[in-house]
Image (cartoon, rainbow, N blue to C red):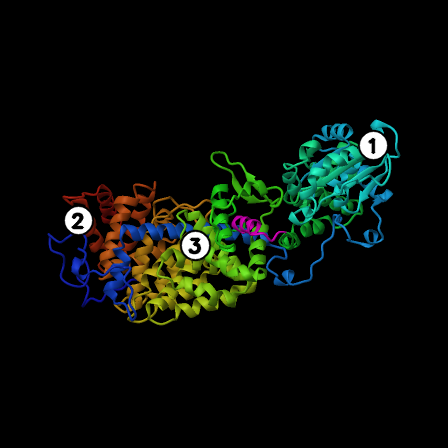
Amino acid sequence: MSKESPAETPDIGSEGPDPAPGAPESPKPAPESERRSADTEQDGPVSESDALRNLTESTTADDAERSEALQAGAIADLIAQRLNDDASGTRIGTLALFNDSVSFGGGFNTTGGRGPAAQRGLRALPLEPSEVVGHTELFVHPEGYDDALGALCDQRLLVLTGVPGSGREAVAVNLLGEAFALRGGGDGACHRLLDATTMLEPGWEPPGKNTGYLVSIDDGPAGMRGFADRMHQLPSVVAALRATGGLLVLTGGHDLTMALRGPGGAAVATHVLVPADPLAILERRVLGHGEDPEAQAKLHALIESTGAARALREQPAARHAARLASVIGAGGDVAAEAAALRDPSDQVRTWFDRYREPEALAFALASATLEGSTYLTVSEAAVKLRTSLTPPELAAPDLRFRDRVGHEQQWIHLVPTDSGPPQVRFRSALLGQVILRYAWTSLDGQREAILAWLRQLLSHRDVEVRARAAVAAGVLASADHHYAVHRFLTAWAGSASWPVRQAAATALGVAGSRPESTDSVWDLLDSWARGGSSAQQRRLAGTAANAVGGLLGREAPERAVAVLHAALDRGDDWGTLPSVAWGGVHLIHQGQAGALLDAYLEWSEPQDLSPLVVKSLSAFVFAATRPYERVADGPAEGVPGTPLLLSGLPLHGEQLAELWARALARRPVQESALEALRKWIDTYCDKCPGSLDALGTLLVDVAGRPGSHRRRLLWWLDQWDRSRDRPSKNAAVLHRRVERES
């Protein structure tokens, strides 16, 4: 219970004489000559008067900056929470994934000298019958298949391009078989040319007559070496095929498409493959050509319940559909196979092994950092990162990242929005953080540039960009906590810039939400909270207080309160009060008001003028005045523009009544408490339906406590009701109720 000393407490008001009839309604600020800017930081303890002034007299610019930082932190917490939810049950976060030896299967090599057959001088090998059956028996025709078939029959050579995993080889084999069947003649055998470049040599002739040939170009620039500069020979290849009755399908990806724009490309038929629906492929391979509705329904239920459907939406390659179909057909563990397919670790490792150019790396990392932002936002960030990864250039580079989506960056897609430009998103929610961790732990020569780029994003004008960059920093920190602390986290946490300190707090929250680094992060925050009184150490303590108001505090409010106490209880050094007060606001917005209010009650229990009591009550009053800013899917529910402690009434009513009673009882907290209470009455109650009645109940409780609380409340409510400058109708309502019911 609140208590007042009879020898020190007047009948009305605070320590000192009773207020005279002409007493001011609220305290006057200190003279301008006595003020010190909140941004002026000095080593050594900060006085009580300076700390309270900094807490209550922040400038509009300060409020705007801190409000944006609070919004960035809230957005970042939501993003990080979704990342943690998506990562549940996967292997991401295990660094050993990226240190193992890597071998890649799938596809086939087509450049010269790559195997025993080539070394023996063979020019072509027939496909094995089992390969042909596997490609043709349960084949699903993709969109535009008939057009491709007609072009092959007419032109003899068809260039078939598509994204990796789209089933290019299966389509090519079916096209060759059906083309020979339509034309008649020949055995329709399909041979694979072992060296794609040999057919572009002058005087080339097919190894046999009336035969179909499959030629594959590996994806990426490496696959085009020795091929792109000889594309002008394609008309001669067409002539040779006509002379021998042969057919040829040349398959490749985006680089082959671009090469066809050069000499020789116009002389051949081309077709861009639209991949078949992977769910249709899976259904065909499991159920065959039958159309049993009951069997289809059972299959659809199976793939939805096991996560197989989601896995194919994230990785819609034909080979993945075939892989799942084989597991289903064999009666295997479909859920385990789907989970393995969704794990992006191998996919990320394979991509980084194939694509090493700065353009590719820059767009992948920018997308991983800013996923969900618009294309122009991501591409702008990618250009800046690419500049950091390459030597200076005299002219602006010709970069067209949109052309890479779906080919080099096929794990990314542009998602249309209801109103506005498309957003950049990965097909799997797990990919972004795995890409960031892999780049951070494996691209040793580019780590410095990546970190400098992230630091630049923390100063971006778009608050969502800053939030996403902070989350990305947390993902990097979780890879090696010790390294991150000494490399960038401590510097950011001790920065003179509030947004940068907010980013450090967010990054620590992200890193600490991973089980492998939780204890290390809490130990770090506790050590910062107990630091010295230099300006830099106070900023570290403030960042610790800020951090525990995020994800960490939501999950472990008791540990969060302990850090706030360590940061606040510094004797006569008041420098951490603003940061702890803001940390309390964060914790309330995380839905942990109960734990915080209990702590404020415990710390202010002596109800004297000791530093911890005044600091605790000042932090409470500050939290009571901070309006709630809605963030989509946020943990706390409230009325935007109204403090959560008011809009949530009668929740925590007993704690709030006691804290208000203590805050209103004595200076120096009384002055700010009176201002806060009047703001509740005149400003916030009008924004929040029902809050005036709830506040009345609260004030009746305060007035009913032993001491002068009733007389004090009635006096101030009457003063505000009869104010000449700002008469308050709400105060009159509350005055009548307190007088009647207490």
Whichever of callouts 1 and 2 sits on the residue coming sooner in the sequence is 1
Around disc 1, counting alpha carbons within 10 Å, would you say few (fewer than 14), some (14 to 19), or many (20 or more)? few
Q: Please tell me how crowded label 2 is: few (under 14), some (14-19), or many (20+) other residues with Cα within 10 Å.
A: many
| Residue 706 seen in this snapshot | no
Extent of the magenta region:
355-367
Gap in angstroms between the C-alphas marked 3 and 2: 52 Å
* Amino acid type at image mark 2: Gln
The residue positioned 31% from the left and 51% from the top of the image is 63
Is 414 a magenta residue?
Answer: no
User: Which residue is at a point 38% across and 68% down the rendered structure image?
Assistant: 566
Q: Give whichever of discs 3 and 2 has the lower sequence position.
A: 3
Q: Which residue was labeled with disc 2? A: 719
What residue lies at 40% left-to-right and 54% top-to-bottom? Answer: 588
Find disc 1 in the rendering and name its residue. Answer: 243
Give the left or right position of residue 233, taking residue 721 as reference: right
Q: Residues within 10 Å of mark 3 (few under 14, many from 20)?
A: some
Asked if residue 5 lies left or right of residue 517, the reply is left
Label 2 sits on a secondary structure element that is helix
Q: Quadrant of residue 119?
A: bottom right
- Pick the front one: 600 or 742: 600
In this view, 690 is above or below 478? above
The residue singled out by tag 3 in the image is 456
Between discs 1 and 3, the one toward the N terminus: 1
Residue 363 among those drawn in magenta: yes
Task: Say which amino acid is labelled 3.
Answer: Gln
Q: CA distance from mark 1 to mark 2?
A: 106 Å
